[in-house]
Amino acid sequence: MLNKLSGVMRTFGPSVAILVAGALVLPACGGGKSKTIEESLKTNAEDELLKDYKPSPKKRPNGLPPPTDAELAAWDRKDPEGEKHLYKHDKKNLKKLINYWQELECHRDEVKREGAKAFGVEPGSPEEEKWYQFKQIFIPKINAWQQRLLANEPRIMEKSKMIGHFFEAHELVMNGYPVAYNNGDKTELEKADLHWEVVQNKISKYIKNIADGEELPKWDDSDPKELKKHEEFCEKALNPPKNKGQRRKAPSRGGGKRKAKTIEM
């Protein structure tokens, strides 16, 4: 072996000779049983550690009595009030909630009125363009109605049971009806009308239950005074006043006085 290394050094230099010597010595260090890279990768280190592990769990105590009826009842405890607090809130605020529902009815009437003008028209026609322009204004407006409701009633989702029906109807007005008119789909339009009727019946039945048989008020279009009142109500519902914020005084500097500024929201 030394003769071979000497020849390598004369031929290639000492550096290569050291590499050759390492290559000849390494297999002997492992006794010829060293693992290849592939074998090492296949070996699961966790399995190697756990192969000699013997668990010794503690025995569960015997003789414990089974749970009593009182304990089982405690585990299955329900709120004795249930949804009564929701009914109390809705009954107390019924006038306000009905007002929200009637505002939704105004938005529904508007989208049905404008959508009927564009139902089945040719793409690119003036009627189709008017319908498109209407949606550009109407969709943000009906979306703002919901945002305004939640801003004015920040905890209504946890206090009211009726609000869920409002959101269901709102989705119809904001999405269901526009899609039906977009596609000129008579079946989808009928489904939307039936869905609205179902929601309306749910609200009507709910009001009867919590308000001692009180009926959901409906507008009488045959009465000119009632019709005018309805039109005025919808005009306010569809065009709510803008929130201009509150007047506040600007902080004075150097002892001087400044006029109050109006902050627009």
Image (tube, rainbow, N blue to C red):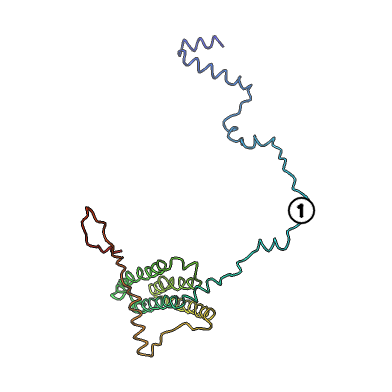
Residue ID for mark 1: 64
Q: Residue at x 75, y 57 (%)?
A: 66
Q: Is residue 225 above or below residue 72?
A: below
Task: Place residue 122 in its image quadrant.
Answer: bottom left
Q: Position of residue 84 (x, y in %)?
A: 56, 72
State the quadrant of the C terminus.
bottom left
Query: In the image, residue 42 lies at what x, y percent?
Result: 60, 36
The answer to which of 193 and 70 lies nearer the viewer is 70
With 58 as the anchor, is 114 left or right in this view? left
Secondary structure type for disc 1: loop
Which residue is depicted at the point 76% across and 53% down? 64
Left or right position of 182 against 155: left
Q: Is residue 156 above or below residue 38?
A: below
In the displayed structure, 54 sits above or below 79; it is above
**Number of marks present in the image shown:** 1
Q: Residue at x 31, y 72 (%)?
A: 241
Q: Residue furthest front?
A: 255
The quadrant holding residue 12 is top left
Report crowding for label 1: few under 14, some 14 to 19, many 20 or more residues within 10 A (C-alpha).
few
- Residue 149 image position (x, y, % from top left): 41, 69
111 or 213: nearer the viewer: 213
Residue occupying the far left of the picture: 256
Q: Label 1 amino acid? A: Leu
Specify whether 71 is left or right of 112.
right
Q: Of residues 111 and 217, which is closer to you in this image?
A: 217
Identified at 76% across, 48% down, the residue is 61
| Image quadrant containing the N terminus | top right
Where residue 10 appears, as percent x and y from the top left, is 47, 10
Q: Nearer the viewer, residue 127 or 8?
A: 127
Residue lying farthest to the bottom in this orientation: 223
